[in-house]
Image (spheres, coloured by chain):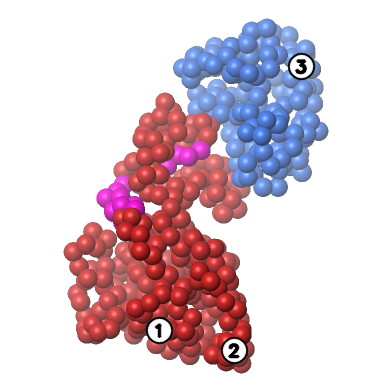
Amino acid sequence: MSKILCSVATRGRYFTTLPLVIQAILNQSRLPDKLIIFDDNDEPQDMRNEPLYQNLFYVMHCKGLDWEWVYAPKKGQHHIHQMANTWGFDWVWRVDDDAIPEPNVLDTLSAYALGNVGAVGGTVMNPPHKPECLGSSGLIKNIYSEPNIQWGLIDEVKMVEHLYCSFLYRAGVHDFNLGLSRVAHREETLFTYGLHKKGYDLFVVPDAMTWHLKSPTGGIRSEVGQEMYEHDERIFRNFVEHKDKTIVVLNCGLGDHIVFSKILPKIKNPIVFTCYPEVVPGRSIAEAQSLFGDIDQWNIYKKMDAWKWTESIEKAFERMYL
Amino acid sequence: MILISPYSKKLTNGKENPKNYPYWKELLSMIDEPVIQVGITGETQICTDFRQNLSLDDLKMLLQACRTWIGCDSFFQHLAWSEGKPGIVLWGISDPLIYGHPENVNLLKGREYLAPNQFLWWEAYEFDADRFVKPDVVLKHL
């Protein structure tokens, strides 16, 4: 059976919503195989000294839930999610530190974690919104013109192109964009849309309600710098603007460019960023960094390392872009 | 005429690239036909005819004119492959199954000499002449 990691990134909510989230996870009808609390607090504490947490840890022990408390690097939740993404589990259920899942949520979501599914999410109800169907499409082209489909009741299984807040995703097949600022605005939309672009199916499903008890204080995004939001929004908009293109970033050597040039004609609607335009014509790598933030997601050597690759580099390029 | 491209690109730490073939001088002394070396400024000259900093077009013309070529794992083997000109590649720590082309004669002393991680920077590995085949092995394939 697939192994599921539950990851919770937290900041500034030790004594508000985080204990509620942990209790909600403990009350799941299907427990995850492991729970990791990624503590991104400015002044992290040892919660084993707190009576409330001592009790929660005791319940984890009694229920046989493997858990870990990880002090995070304070670089933003996208770095935390990438750690969870590569922790070695098959699936990751990410739960925000103010998102309270009903007891059946993981059981329901994991029932869809099959085949070509890349991620699956349910309703994320934001009080005091009314629980009603919104009729949204969940398509990226409509992201600026419709409410998020997960903000409303979901009455049937529906294929979408992006998810937000809390969802279950296939681990290790796509990276979080580490080029975003610490606020990591749109990180989950970028991540899930990336899964969709890679050919994985994304679904929203009924009967998987999470209550988003937005706390007025704390939060993993508790940054005030408007420029960080603007930076991240610009990256997000650039991805959306290029949604019909295959983005090719050749941040690699001259020989790699020569090999890549053989598969370029097979790539559908490419937009190329290149180090050697005399071999593979295109725009500069600096422009790719400016448009998309982190370009390591196109680093063919990192990919081959992650894939434990043993075939030719030409075939690696084909896997990446075709 | 035989074309040789003896060196892989310089490492950022200034050390010898572990992909460089160590026995060029011995090999060249055994070859009985004209040899042209191609490379860039700063590389050690091992042939009388050393042509530096050629454009890709010039390299392609030389490739078409030569009987065959010999090189290490560098961009040159990819260029020759792209031009449909087979040659001999002398492998040490990088894996010809990943970075090579089956159209070439890929001379690897043994897979036990390959770097355990093929996707790190080559700076992580030390140059070791013992990883490579000796010149007499190369000569048999020329």
Q: Which residue is mark 2?
A: A54
B22 lies left or right of A205: right
- Magenta residues, start to end: A231-252
Q: Position of residue A227 (x, y in %)?
A: 33, 55
Q: Residue at x 57, y 77 (%)?
A: A45
State the residue in front, A66 or A38: A38
**Within 10 angstroms of label 1, few (less than 14), some, or many (20 or more) residues?**
many
Q: Which residue is mark 1?
A: A100
Q: Is residue A244 magenta?
A: yes
**N-term mark: 2 or 1:** 2
The relative height of residue A172 versus residue B23 in the rendered view (above or below) is below
Q: Is residue A98 visible?
A: yes
**Within 10 angstroms of label 3, few (less than 14), some, or many (20 or more) residues?**
few
Element class at badge 1: strand
Q: Which residue is mark 3?
A: B25
What is the chain identity of the residue bearing mark 3?
Answer: B
What is the chain identity of the residue bearing mark 2?
Answer: A
Q: Is residue A101 magenta?
A: no
Q: Position of residue A125 (x, y in %)?
A: 30, 81
Q: Are marks 2 and 1 in contact (CB under 8 Å)?
A: no
Discs 3/1, front: 1
Q: Colour of chain B?
A: blue
What is the chain identity of the residue bearing mark 1?
Answer: A
Q: Position of residue A94 (x, y in %)?
A: 45, 73
Q: Position of residue B76 (x, y in %)?
A: 57, 25
The relative height of residue B70 versus residue A63 in the rendered view (above or below) is above
Q: Quadrant of residue A122?
A: bottom left
The relative height of residue B128 versus residue A191 in the rendered view (above or below) is above
